[in-house]
Image: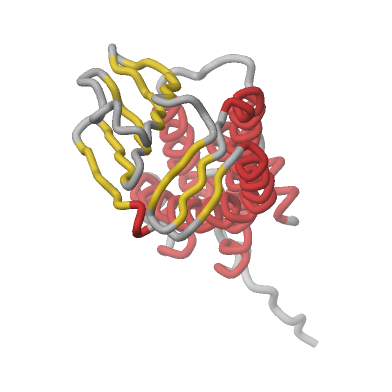
Amino acid sequence: MSHLEALSRVSFDLGVFARVARQRLRRTFVYLALLVLVASASSTTWVMLKLREGVRWLEPHLDEIPTITIRNGVASADVEQPWVKVLGEENGKKWVAIIDTTGTLEGFKPDEYGVFLKRTELLTKQENDERIIPLSRIPDTKIGPDIVREWIREGMRRAPFYVGAFMLIWYLFAKTMTALLLVLAGLTTGRSLRFGQLFTVAVYALTPAVILDAASPFLPFHIPAFWLVYWGLAITYAIVGARRAAETPTEPPATSATL
């Protein structure tokens, strides 16, 4: 039975567990890699869709960005100052971008967070953190709408590779650890199985949960407490699969005919 066939059948044919429990462990790791690819592809696609939504939302606002020049540690901007742009509000606090190289404004108001460009300093403020970055640390540069657009285009070209690589590494670790934990569930009904067999059952038991997890971001509805659903599926299949594998007798070795 091929790995793709197992991927499509394991959710409905519990007899798969009896067959795969006695396969070589090498095939189990290949199947685990297939599950990792499914999970990674889904997550990478979802992240890229959200990034593109963000870029589409940002695009109309790019022309509002003034052109800022930093030379020899001193900032200048082609906009009437003080320039204050409210980016959003959260919990009664405003997220703002401020440019004032004239010294009219001293700093953020108590209800403001964000970035503040002064003549020789860049101020950043978050909820519990406020920093001052001297512009002398920043190399001579020029920032404007066209430059930001180019940064975004370059970032979006590279993002699928960076996001995909991160997801592969993360899911390889996460799914392997999950399978090892599911071995404990399999032990409850499959004590006669060896560790390698229990690990194989655990990996294949992940299939329904991984497929549902991969599909869930694209469903038209939200699944509440999804982590409970995920673990419930995986544990149930691990227990039932281990029982089926343990109850299925091993095929006796073939004997040569006597003459």
Q: Residue at x 60, y 35 (%)?
A: 51
User: In the depicted view, which residue is nearer to us: 155 or 115?
Assistant: 115
User: Up-down: is 174 above or below 225?
Assistant: below
User: Up-down: is 143 above or below 104?
Assistant: below
Farthest right residue?
259
Q: Quadrant of residue 93?
A: top left
- 118 sits left or right of 256 in the view: left
Q: Position of residue 119 (x, y in %)?
A: 35, 42
Q: Position of residue 83 (x, y in %)?
A: 43, 24
State the quadrant of the N terminus: bottom right
User: In the depicted view, which residue is nearer to us: 149 or 228?
Assistant: 149
Q: Position of residue 130 (x, y in %)?
A: 22, 38
Farthest top residue?
92
Q: Quadrant of residue 113?
A: top left
Q: Residue at x 60, y 58 (%)?
A: 33
Q: Tell me if residue 47 can be seen.
A: yes
Q: Residue at x 31, y 45 (%)?
A: 121
Q: Position of residue 174 (x, y in %)?
A: 43, 51
Figure coloring: secondary structure
Q: Tell me if residue 208 can be seen.
A: no
- 192 sits left or right of 37 in the view: left
User: Up-down: is 216 above or below 20?
Assistant: above
Farthest bottom residue?
259
Q: Quadrant of residue 122?
A: top left
- 123 sits left or right of 175 in the view: left
Q: How many marks?
A: 0
State the quadrant of the C terminus: bottom right
